[in-house]
Image: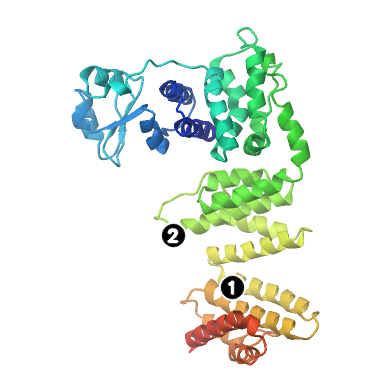
Amino acid sequence: MSMHAIESLVEYSVITTATASPVPPLAQSICYSLYQIQNQLDCGYTVLRVRDELEQLGYLSLLPPEQLPEPERSEARRLAIEGGFLKDGTYVDGCSGKCCVTAGTALWKKLLEMGVLPVSAKAELRLLDPLELAEQIVPLASKALAEGDKRGADTLGHWYAFFPLLCVVEGLDDDNAPEPERIQTLLRLLAVPEAFEVAGAYGKEMDFDFEEEEMSFLAGWETPYNQWKEKQESLFPEFCKRIMYKLIEKHDFAEADRYASLTGDENDPSRLLHRCVVSFACHQWLKAQEPGTLPPERLLSLLEVKEGLEYLSGLPLTEQELATCRIYLLQTLVLLGDYPATIEMQRSLFTEAIDKLEQYPEGETKQIQQIALSISYYQMLYTNLPDDYPSKKEWMRKGFPGLMELPGIKRICGELLPEMPQMADTLQGYMEQCDALIQYLK
């Protein structure tokens, strides 16, 4: 079971509860019950991820150590700089130095009795079971989605994917099963395409045999998702790719790799290609981080990325996949510092590109493409080779058969400017690049 996903379920549920209008009367009990479930599983301490929402709902109070009674005060002072947990499990945040007191704990009750916490924080907490929790949260998420809040879909998707698992954690089975009407009412709210798009990322974890688990009260739970998936099967890999690239932008490489793994089965070249893309992006990002920063465990090493891309380069991929593969292989060689191999591969790629360009009819369009291809050759050498590489300038000066030299590119761009005013910005940009590269080579 994905602990990361359970943490996400809790966070989205808290956000849905906090942004509801009106906020449900059982808001504190909802938060209390969510974190009780999370604490039963191998999850991290995630309360501060939704700190503002939890404070708003009265579940979380951030207090300086001075406001705590003894012995908690002394404990908290010792932990205020580095952070950590008090003996009763209360967390002290090392960033703010404050104590994260949550509703329902012994310290929370003590602070209420002392009058440190306001009377408004006092609530009769109820421990809600998973179905009661879902019956509180899911209608709020459904309403939020209907009003255009996409976070509602995240909440619905996580509840659809993991409600059966929460039933297992709760110990529900056919002997103490809830009423079928309640399950069906919940399922009708959850069984929407927006929720399935989110839940689909956890497809393997939704593969339940409810009869075998003695949970026949959930029979048919997966049916609406499977029906939707059959219709969407051809679109699902594209959806995963879109999410993968968004997660790369956020530097969430572990989650991006999970989505990359869903783009195909283990024998699908597309799956390996996208895992290589994620791992390369992570290793590139790590170069700018503090020394010792490690990539997530499941990611490929840089050498594995290179081997994977070399293997893929020999397969009959689509033109787009092959182009992606070669671009990332070239950049992987750069990242590995294998500059002779980088130069060799770049020259091979440009030989192919020149051969294709030769097939175009003569004219302005072909001339512009020749200019763009020539500029990119010099620019790639300039970017990919470090300044202290001994023969960098020599490689740039010697040019490449079939490509224009830098002075010639600049001259032709100048000649085309009055003839092609619609391309003025592009041509001017090429001339500026030529000037910069020529200046570098002096």
- Residue 112 image-quadrant placement: top left
Binning the other alpha carbons within 10 Å of mark 2 as few (below 14), some (14 to 19) or many (20 upward) gives few
Q: Secondary structure at mark 2?
A: loop
What residue would you read off at disc 2?
288
Determine if residue 23 is in view. yes
- Residue 108 image-quadrant placement: top left
- Residue 345 image-quadrant placement: bottom right
Amino acid type, callout 1: Pro
Q: Position of residue 278 (x, y in %)?
A: 58, 52
Amino acid type, callout 2: Ala
Mark nearest the camera among 2 and 1 is 2
Among numbered discs 2 and 1, the one appearing first in the sequence: 2
Q: CA distance from mark 2 to mark 1?
A: 24 Å
Q: Position of residue 40 (x, y in %)?
A: 47, 22
Q: Secondary structure at mark 1?
A: helix
Q: Position of residue 97 (x, y in %)?
A: 26, 38
What residue would you read off at disc 1?
340
Q: Position of residue 197 (x, y in %)?
A: 65, 39
Determine if residue 1 is in view. no
Task: Classify 330 as above or below 79.
Answer: below
On-image quarter of the N terminus? top right
Q: Is disc 2 in contact with disc 1, using a CB cutoff of under 8 Å? A: no
Residue drawn at x 48%, y 84% as measured from the top left: 440
Q: Depth check: give the residue in front, 6 or 16.
A: 16
Residue positioned most to the top: 175
Tag count in the figure? 2
The answer to whether residue 292 is left or right of residue 87 is right
The answer to whether residue 106 is left or right of residue 22 is left
